[in-house]
Image (cartoon, grey):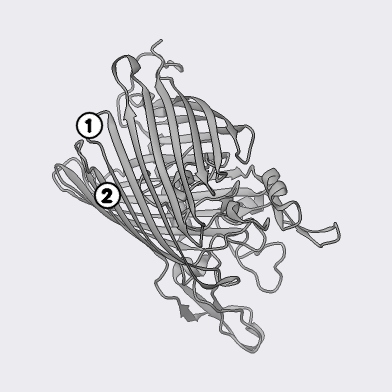
Amino acid sequence: MTKKILTLLLMALATTVAGAQEEEKTEPLRPLHGLGYMVEAQGSFSRGNTPLWLNANKQGLSSIEKNNGYLRAALERPLRVDSGRHWGVGYGVDLVVPFNYTSKFIVQQAYGELRWLSGALTIGSKHYPMQMKDNLLSSGSQTLGINARPVPQVRLSLPEYWTVPLTRGWLHLKGHIAYGKYTDQNWQHDFTGRQQRYTDGVLYHSKAGYLKVGNEDIFFPLSIEAGLEMATQFGGKRYTPNGDGTFDVLENASNLSAYWHALFPNGSGDASETKYKNEEGNILGSWMLRINYDADAWILGVYADKFFEDHSAMLQANAGYKEGDGWNTRDYHKWFIYDFKDWLLGIDFHYKYNNWLNDLVFEYLYSRYQSGPTYHDHTPNISDQVTGRDNYYNHHIYPGWQHWGQVMGNPLYRSPIYNSDGKVEVKNNRFMAFHLGVSGEPNENLSYRVMATYQEGFGTYDDPYTKRRHNVSVMAEAAYKFDNRLQGWTVSGAFGADMGSILGHNYGVQVTIKKSGVFKK
């Protein structure tokens, strides 16, 4: 399945490079034309930790310390400046001086990118938006979210939907393939005090493909999007303290073969696995589906995000094994079928004109199943294998699906940065939640958004809560854009709160002042 999707994506990249579909501009490329700037200052002041929705889904530019803030300056030339020519050049640098953060200085973004027709090559750290969800109101994607700092990477992509030839404008494709390296190993040293397990030099791989069926050139308001997002942590060294000042060190493969197995998993197993081999590295992903209805004045969408932690959960089935001398060989006549649970289901509404109510999002999340509570590997005498207890966002070798203490997917999975015992792990990954987001623009200057989430948590299979825990997180934010002499200036203020036994009782305010614009010369 993964090979078919990657093959289709690579064919699309090759096709879009093979021929031009638009007439190129004749004037020379001006690398400084369209260069934008942004300066920003933010302060957060709380009783307890910074509330969830004042720090989550901000590309990791956040802190849970009760008083924190930053000064920020950025320059960016987006690829869209060259949208009318075959070649396009983009770049950006985004620097932050924070206080009470996990770092004293942050290179939030630093990248360069080159586009030829519809295909793009990006090198460096860059913010990438969530797919098929509202980036301001959704609780977050379960795989490729916007909650953690970006990983420096080399990324080959079709960033926007590309229309497949000979489909009369009905079939569209986009996606990416990327490799990178995590930058949080020093943070892991400090957070764990080297008294808990940590991993250095972890490598990153992600890939995604999205198909869209619909035609915007004719009056047909219905369209369907489907996609697969996958990511892998691999390579690096795991250090497990023995309690006497020494460490057990496990070195994972980081050669060319490891890069290939991250792209196409083949069951080669991790360095610690011998008899019972799984896929190499920490593999996770999501199946995604969205249905849109685009009317004259509004858009309505319903969507699903089905998370998985391994190939058996990805396919909702696991093949059994043979008996006797072939006990360690797959028997594809025997299958174990998993229940269809663990979803993010959502609906969103967007009104196209400025109004008191422009956007509304409602989501339901369920992650309690995780392929079931039982884990049993086959043996020479028992050919059945039931591989449950997937332990979402955690892994026995790697620090889990997190970066700098913040989960890289949906922030309702309790991020390791909240832990007081120095363990880099997600302590609440089995939960049920309801989430609501509302925003509006009463006029061109004023906007607001409100978010509210109810969560019921059960801990993890390995370390369950002794009783159900509950949490309510709310946030209300208003922003004002100035015009005339103060054009480009924006001031926003937000209030947030957490109430419950998952994140504790936290209350806080956040004030942000920003100036942005484009250099005219």
The N terminus is located in which quarter? bottom left
The answer for how far apart the CA atoms under marks 2 and 1 are is 18 Å
Residue indicated by mark 2: 360
Residue at the disc numbered 1: 443
- The quarter of the displayed image where residue 510 is located: top left
Residue drawn at x 82%, y 62% as measured from the top left: 243
Residue 233 placement (x, y as % from top left):
60, 53
Asked if residue 114 lies left or right of residue 163, the reply is: right
The percent position of residue 458, horizontal first and vertical second, equals 50, 69
x and y percentages locating residue 341 in the rendered image: 40, 70
Which quarter of the figure has residue 520? top left
Q: What residue is at 46 percent from the left and 70 percent from the top? A: 368
In the picture, which quadrant includes the C terminus?
top left
Q: Residue at x 68, y 49 (%)?
A: 191
Res. 400 image quadrant: bottom right
In front: 517, or 205? 517
The x, y position of residue 30, in whole percent, is 43, 15
